[in-house]
Image (tube, rainbow, N blue to C red):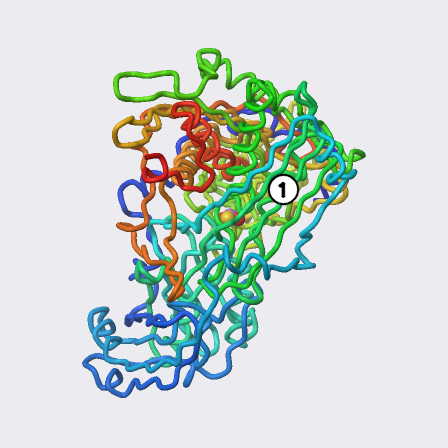
């Protein structure tokens, strides 16, 4: 189905099932520990052996000698895979460094060996017996130092401009200019990267934990040098991804290589320390923001520059992305530069770009509002835009940012905020409130699904879409139920298998809107097939209560399929509208904090998010997404930081004891409001992404609240206690 004009009224608008706060259908499995995760799939194939990954002990250089002879003789060992014996390997489209390193080492804990043994303990013990001699080279590990050698990656749209920023900034009656830093962060999901691999002749099946099935199949085939038709990837349940599982990683490749070498199925989970240095992370940034305004608070100049680092061949952290679109202002400049660093591979983590970008931009907006003597809510409202400010001929499909700010201010009790920093005290605590805007694009991408109606009147949906804890199973079931006029219990959803039609996958908050739109398209075809059985016009047929009706005629759906399953498959494809309109999601975050005057301890007391993200398909799962994202945003503001060893080039705090993340108990009160909107330009579902919007701007709201509480502005994140004392 081609989606190239705004959606008219369609069956989703009935809202009998879609839009209801339905509990997740996989919820009981998750909460009782019975959702089978990749490493636990003891059932799928017999005789599984265990793999243990060895990571490089240096960040840059080469292996002079790798002696695995003792390991090979160790008890229970079945195989040792290294670059010396793995044969020629390709490199996946989405990988920067090699997933199996050697003799050259590109980053610390790059995998250099897999030991396969009868038991996990035997594999681990044998791994200690591998002797590696390295020749260490000095790498670049310090972004600040590498900043001056940073370059503009041409394929990443590093520069943008409109008007004349330099002149306008110079002429602006009120100017603001400050430089900030954000930290390297880890996805730190609960379930590690894990895979069971099994070969059947030249056919490979991997049971793994991956957000993007189709990308995974492609990159695994490319890396192994086999046809993609020979690779099956299965990932029905995922214990967190956050962008860390968008790509093929070492667990899947090494499990496949290990299984080949051992001639047995092999399971591999990355040990927790490898999660930090072996896989990807959100790169640190240095960001400079310059704002120029008239005395009444109209922005006339907006400049945002960002520097980040990555391995050779890697990419930018696109931290200025939102600044190109968020606020009006005739004269603008954004610029991103990439420094070559030899730290582990940087890549996407929840709201890549906007998360660190808004951390900085929205604090700068707070600082500017104060300079102007304006309320920070009013300052943002004053500079709202309904068009792409760099290309004014391009309107937003919808933009209700002002409504988010006003609704949130009202609900949060913003009028009780004392604008004078450091002036509200409760005993030894200083109390303050902060606000920040949220922005994240709504990305459109093709997504396919297959639907089957059987003689029981049950519709089964098959798509390679994933549920990374987001609620995909549920919203897809809701979509099919609404389309076919069935109760939720009569829809069966099967996800995460590369034998199913190729979906959008889960990433960039594009999963919900695109994958349900693909299911919508398939269901339109299934409705046609049912109508044909009855010889009625599908356009006027009504699907309700498990029946199809046309005038006086009616038939149970089960009967339509009694002579055999009806099967329909289609994809949503987008054409044109996304070029004509800028599609984004908006929000406002409010936060109240208390800061202890003696210890600098920061306590988040309450938070509120107001989201403008089109139709909310399931307010319950969407709310959970936003609350989780808000919690993660508190992490970026207050505690999440990978500590860089700048001499040796690795992240020191490589476990969940050293890498601190907030939990729900850290924030006593969180609330979410969804504006009641539908966006007919986004898709037939009229929905948009919301799971990443939830983190965008949160950190800045926390930082701004800390400033309001204490009068002390911290520009280097996270705001750990030492920076406040
Ligand atoms: Mo997201 S960082 O694209 O999973």
Measured from the top left, where is residue 96 in percent x and y?
Answer: 53, 66
Front residue (pair 72, 716): 716
Measuring 66% from the left and 21% from the top, which residue is drawn there? 297
Left or right for 46, reference 198: left
Q: Nearer the viewer, residue 154 or 25?
A: 154
Nearest the eye: 399 or 572: 399
Q: Secondary structure at mark 1?
A: strand
Quarter location, residue 264: bottom left
In the picture provided, is 719 more to the left or to the right than 539?
A: left
44 is higher (above) or lower (below) than 699: below
Vertical comparison of 276 with 354: above or below: below
Residue 612's spot in the image, x, y percent?
Answer: 57, 27
Q: Which residue is mark 1?
A: 304
Q: Please identify the quarter of the rendering in which residue 423 is found.
A: top left
Residue 186 in picture, x, y percent from top left: 40, 51
The residue lying toward the viewer, choosing from 535 and 89, is: 89
| Percent position of residue 464, x then y | 52, 53
Which residue is pictured at 44% across the width and 72% down the height? 138
């Amino acid at each position: 189905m081609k989606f190239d004009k705004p959606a008219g009224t369609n069956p989703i608008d009935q809202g009998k099932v879609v839009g209801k706060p339905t509990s997740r259908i996989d919820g009981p499995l998750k909460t009782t520990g019975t959702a089978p995760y990749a490493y636990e799939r003891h059932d799928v194939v017999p005789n599984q052996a265990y793999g243990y990954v060895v990571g490089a002990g240096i960040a840059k250089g080469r292996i002079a000698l790798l002696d695995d002879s003792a390991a090979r003789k160790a008890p229970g060992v079945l195989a040792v895979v290294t670059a010396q014996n793995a044969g020629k390997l390709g490199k996946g489209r989405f990988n920067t460094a090699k997933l199996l390193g050697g003799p050259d080492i590109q980053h610390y804990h790059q995998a250099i060996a897999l030991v396969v043994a009868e038991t996990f303990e035997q594999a681990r013990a044998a791994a200690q017996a591998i002797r590696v001699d390295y020749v260490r080279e000095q790498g670049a590990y310090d972004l600040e130092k590498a900043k001056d050698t940073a370059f503009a990656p041409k394929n990443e749209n590093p520069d943008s401009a409109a008007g004349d920023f330099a002149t306008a900034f110079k002429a602006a009656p009120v100017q603001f200019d400050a430089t900030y830093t954000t930290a390297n962060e880890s996805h730190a999901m609960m379930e590690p990267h894990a895979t069971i691999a099994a070969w059947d002749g030249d056919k490979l099946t991997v049971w793994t934990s991956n957000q993007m099935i189709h990308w995974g199949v492609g990159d695994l085939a490319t890396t192994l040098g086999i046809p993609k038709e020979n690779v099956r990837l299965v990932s029905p349940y995922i214990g967190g991804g956050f962008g860390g599982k968008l790509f093929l990683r070492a667990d899947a490749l090494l499990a496949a290589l290990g299984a080949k070498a051992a001639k047995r199925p092999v399971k591999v989970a990355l040990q927790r320390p490898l999660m930090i240095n072996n896989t990807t992370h959100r790169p640190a940034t240095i960001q400079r923001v310059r704002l120029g305004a008239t005395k009444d608070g109209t922005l006339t100049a907006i400049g945002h520059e960002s520097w980040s680092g990555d391995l050779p061949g890697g990419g930018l952290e696109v931290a200025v992305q939102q600044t190109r679109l968020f606020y009006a202002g005739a004269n603008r400049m954004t610029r991103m530069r990439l420094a070559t660093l030899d730290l582990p591979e940087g890549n996407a983590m929840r709201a890549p770009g906007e998360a660190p970008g808004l951390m900085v931009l929205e604090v700068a907006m707070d600082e500017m509002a104060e300079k102007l003597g304006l309320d920070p809510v009013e300052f943002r409202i004053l500079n709202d835009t309904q068009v792409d400010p760099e290309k004014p001929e391009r309107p937003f499909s919808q933009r209700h940012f002002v409504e988010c700010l006003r609704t949130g201010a009202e609900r949060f009790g913003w009028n009780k905020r004392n604008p004078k920093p450091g002036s509200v005290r409760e005993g030894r605590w200083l109390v303050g409130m902060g606000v920040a805007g949220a922005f994240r694009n709504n990305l459109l991408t093709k997504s396919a699904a297959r639907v089957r109606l059987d003689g029981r009147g049950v519709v089964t949906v098959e798509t390679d879409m994933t549920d990374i804890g987001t609620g995909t199973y549920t919203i897809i079931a809701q979509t099919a139920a609404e389309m076919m006029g069935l109760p939720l219990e009569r829809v069966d959803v099967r996800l995460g298998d590369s034998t199913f039609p190729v979906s959008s996958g889960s990433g960039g908050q594009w999963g919900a809107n695109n994958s349900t739109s693909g299911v919508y398209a398939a269901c339109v075809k299934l409705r046609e097939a049912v109508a044909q059985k009855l010889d009625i016009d599908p356009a006027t047929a009504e699907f309700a209560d498990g029946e199809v009706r046309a005038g006086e005629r009616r038939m149970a759906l089960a009967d339509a399929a009694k002579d055999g399953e009806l099967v329909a498959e289609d994809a949503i494809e987008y054409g044109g509208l996304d070029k004509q309109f800028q599609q984004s999601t908006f929000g406002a975050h409010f936060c109240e904090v208390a800061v202890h005057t003696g210890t600098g301890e920061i306590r988040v007391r309450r938070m509120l998010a107001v989201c403008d993200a089109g139709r909310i398909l399931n307010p319950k799962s969407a709310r959970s997404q936003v609350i989780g994202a808000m919690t993660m945003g508190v992490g970026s503001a207050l505690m999440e930081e990978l500590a860089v060893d700048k001499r040796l080039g690795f992240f020191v705090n490589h476990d969940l004891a050293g890498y601190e993340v907030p939990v729900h108990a850290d924030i006593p009160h969180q609330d979410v409001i969804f504006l009641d909107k539908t966006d007919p330009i986004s898709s037939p579902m009229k929905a948009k992404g919301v799971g990443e919007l939830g983190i965008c701007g949160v950190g800045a709201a926390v930082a701004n609240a800390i400033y309001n509480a204490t009068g002390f502005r911290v520009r280097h994140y996270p705001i750990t206690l030492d920076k406040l004392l």
